Image (cartoon, rainbow, N blue to C red):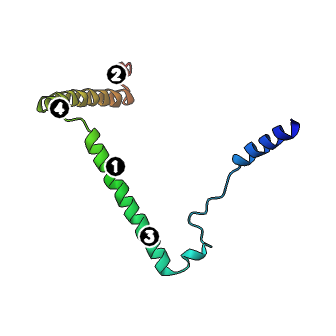
Amino acid sequence: MKLASLVCAFAAGVAFLPVAALADDPNDPTMRSAAARARDSAIIKRMNQQQLAYVRKRDAQQTPRVRPGDRAAYADARAEYDRKMAAWRRAVAACNAGRWEYCDN
């Protein structure tokens, strides 16, 4: 019984040990030639382009459609937000200039 639990504990410990990654190993013998590095670079570039195409397609499908009325409502809300921010910035500038009545907000 003790031996079995010891073996299980050892196996669990070994499973969680960090393992050194071999990616981008400068001493990798398969990457010594310029042709091999160029081939590897081309593969990585192709994989990156495929992933970018996938992400763009996924995002295009997930983007909610905006109706024309929603655009107007957004523009109104954004204009109101911009007005409030401008007023707040003026109040901060006045407070920093010593006009203490503007410092409450």
Q: Is disc 2 in contact with disc 3, using a CB cutoff of under 8 Å? A: no
- Residue 94 sits in which quadrant? top left
How packed mark 3 is, by other alpha carbons closer than 10 Å (few <14, some 14-19, many 20 or more), is few
- Which numbered disc covers residue 102? 2
SS assignment at label 4: helix
Element type at mark 1? helix
Assess disc 4: are there few (<14), some (14-19) or many (≥20) residues with their C-alpha within 10 Å of its C-alpha.
few
Quadrant for the N terminus in the image: top right
- N-term mark: 3 or 1: 3
| The label number, if any, that marks residue 39 in the structure image | none
Residue under numbered circle 3: 41
Q: Residue at 44% across / 74% down in the picture?
A: 39
Name the outermost residue toward the right: 2
Disc with the residue nearer the chain's start (1 vs 4) = 1
In depth, the one of 18 and 73 nearer the eye is: 18
The residues bearing labels 2 and 1 have C-alpha atoms spaced at a distance of 47 Å
- Mark earlier in primary sequence (2, 1): 1
- Residue at the image position 61 percent from the left and 63 percent from the top: 22
Residue 75 tag number: 4
Residue that badge 1 annotates: 55
Which residue occupies 57% across, 63% down?
23
- Given the image, on which type of amino acid does mark 2 rest? Tyr
Q: Is residue 95 above or below residue 23?
A: above
Q: Amino acid at mark 3?
A: Ser
What residue type is disc 4 on? Ala
Tag 1: amino acid: Val
Q: Marks 4 and 3, how far apart in space?
A: 45 Å
Q: Residue at position x 31%, y 45% from top? A: 58
